[in-house]
Amino acid sequence: MVFVHTNNLENGTELLRRSIFIYEYACIPTLFGSFSERDTEINLMDADLPENKGFFSALFRLMQISCMVGCLETSLCISRFLLSLDPIRDPMGILLTLDYFTLATHNFRYLVDLVDSNVVSNSYMDSL
């Protein structure tokens, strides 16, 4: 992010992509937790583990940089991926930006399906 803030976007983006590649390459089974619902096993990533914080942060920064340069489709895809890693807790606050990316890319069907799926809480009262 130092490169990005000093107007050296190319080097900053390259370092982010390299870090994400390293995280994906070094992915080990302890990075993933498991969630069981209705006899189906869903693998989720726990953002609270120290090994995973960097991965979540790198993806979030790549989503921000993609939005800054005008790649809204890429930002939407990254935000959907981040939300799918931990949809119940949403540790990076993806729901706050997901509607913007969805509406800006005219991908309305995804937003309607997400709200209808009841996978994520729509309001504070839903989570109680």
Image (spheres, grey):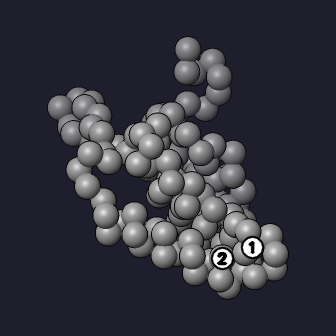
Q: Specify whether 21 is left or right of 65.
A: left
What residue is drawn where x is 31% and y is 64%? 26
Q: Which residue is mark 2?
A: 12
Quadrant of the rendered structure where residue 13 is?
Answer: bottom right
Q: Sort mark 2 into few (<14), some (14-19) or many (20+) by Cα contacts within 10 Å.
A: many
What residue is drawn where x is 48% and y is 76%? 18
Please, what is the three-letter code of the amino acid marked with disc 1?
Val
Residue 94 or 99: which is nearer the viewer?
A: 94
The circle on residue 16 is none
What residue is drawn where x is 26% and y is 55%? 28
Q: Residue furthest bottom?
A: 10
Quadrant of the rendered structure where residue 33 is?
Answer: top left
Please, what is the three-letter code of the amino acid marked with disc 2?
Gly
Residue 104 locus on image (x, y percent): 72, 66
Residue 93 locus on image (x, y percent): 63, 43
- Asked which secondary structure carries label 2, the reply is helix
Q: Is residue 125 above or below residue 4?
A: above
Q: Is residue 43 visible?
A: no
Q: Which residue is mark 1?
A: 4
- Is the residue under label 1 in contact with that under label 2 (CB below 8 Å)? yes
Q: Residue furthest left?
A: 39
Instruction: Pick the quarter of the image with the C terminus.
Output: top right
